[in-house]
Image: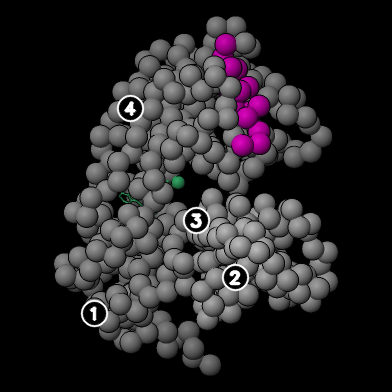
Amino acid sequence: MEYFEELLKRPSVFKDESKLDINFIPDKLPHRDKEISLLSQLFLGLITNPNSISRKILITGKTGIGKTATIKLFGELLEEASRKRDVNIKYIHVNCRKERTSYKVLIKLIQLIDKRFPKRGYSSQDLLDILIEFLHRHNLHILIGLDELSYLINKHEDLIYSLTRINDDTLKGDQRLSIIGVVRDISCLNNLDISTLSTLQRNIINFKNYSKNQILDILKYRAEISLKKNVISNKMLEMVSEITNSTGDIRTGLNILWRACKIAESKNLKYLTAECVRLGSQDLLPFSTLDVLEYMTSQKQIFLLAIIKALDNGRLIDISFNEALKSYNMICENIGLTPRSHSQVWNYLQEFKRENIVVVDVISEKIKGRRALIRIPDLSLPKLEKNTIEILNSKGYII
Ligand SMILES: Nc1ncnc2c1ncn2[C@@H]1O[C@H](COP(=O)(O)OP(=O)(O)O)[C@@H](O)[C@H]1O
Ligand SMILES: [Mg+2]
């Protein structure tokens, strides 16, 4: 009867658990001052000369080094500064990995400024016109953060084409739209037409990886705002930073901190021990993999599961494509799903390769010719299997 009471009586090590969440945007971003200051200089004109300037900036840099957090925080700072001067500027953050088509991005943009806007019944061109109309009518300038832009580029570069040209063609001299695009590296942009590319490439800010000491500072700050005093010693912070430094992805550190704290609480401890940190960092899947996994189509997730199962939970080092295919067909049969074609599944494999989930070694054999051998070298297979099944279950597949 007293389950909650018992739990609530336990001393917590957290001051504010939500501040360790990877989506939380802190008020400060240690070691990104330079970047924020540079962004402020580049966008100052939006405030000093309202609606007469449009800026298009590109941000590059690896995963987990504060690109998203920086532009979101910068968006807030820009809105605040413009409000003080009675200039109407709004920052809108769009994650192109989530809104994968031009249509979805545009709907998202419009709904962020007009919540009652209906979702259906418009073409992309309609939406673009409606957006422009809206900006005029409300005397508004928007800064759009197109995060993870590469997801949009491969298939729907038309939107980027239109957005980068809105000011030129349609606004009769008024400038009402600016863009910050975020990509891992500029090679993602190779598919763009030359003039869009050159527009975007004029201003590139490259975010450098954090050093080990910078990682330590950042995690120290995040621990300060989320944990009670004396819960984590410098020594433990160094331990977490050390592990985080191997990927450079701050999310790893935040996750280890959170898990280690949960473990400490379950042991009724008031502070983190080395054992808590060690347990907290076991079997972590890299966030880059989790991101990719979460947004995959179900068929592709099922094929990944098929590879994991064929690898027999790590008992086999590698398997052939045919073995993966057999395993995939078996899962499909079990759950009553029509399998995708041979060539489609082969494409999935190529995508896994690009997403750094699998390694494919092509070996030549005298008799059979060339053979592809599939491995998953860097990930904990039981963890990956568990996560994949959980996601599939949440979509209604009973595996
Ligand atoms: N300088 C920093 N100070 C505090 N937290 C940071 C800092 N840099 C990154 N983070 C945190 O690390 C996580 C990953 O950052 P994120 O902006 O999502 O990386 P990216 O977009 O480059 O992949 C986020 O939870 C973010 O809040
Ligand atoms: Mg990001």
Q: First in sequence: mark 3 or mark 4?
A: 4
Total numbered labels placed on residues in the image: 4
Amino acid bearing label 3: Asn
Rendered image: mark on residue 40:
4
| Residue type indicated by callout 4 | Ser
Task: Look at mark 2 in the image and give the residue it sits on.
Answer: 319
Q: Amino acid at mark 2?
A: Ile
Going from N to C along the chain, the mark reached first, 1 or 4, is: 4
Q: CA distance from mark 4 to mark 2?
A: 52 Å
Asked if marks 3 and 4 touch (Cβ < 8 Å), the reply is no
The residue positioned 41% from the left and 53% from the top of the image is 24
Report which residue position mark 1 lands on.
273
| The magenta segment | 154-168
Where's residue 71, x and y in %? Answer: 41, 38
Residue 198, image x, y percentages: 48, 19
Q: Secondary structure at mark 4?
A: helix
**Do labels 1 and 2 touch, CB within 8 Å?**
no
In the drawing, does residue 307 fall left or right of residue 62? right
Task: Report, in whole angstroms, how far the alpha carbon at label 1 lies from the one at label 3.
Answer: 33 Å
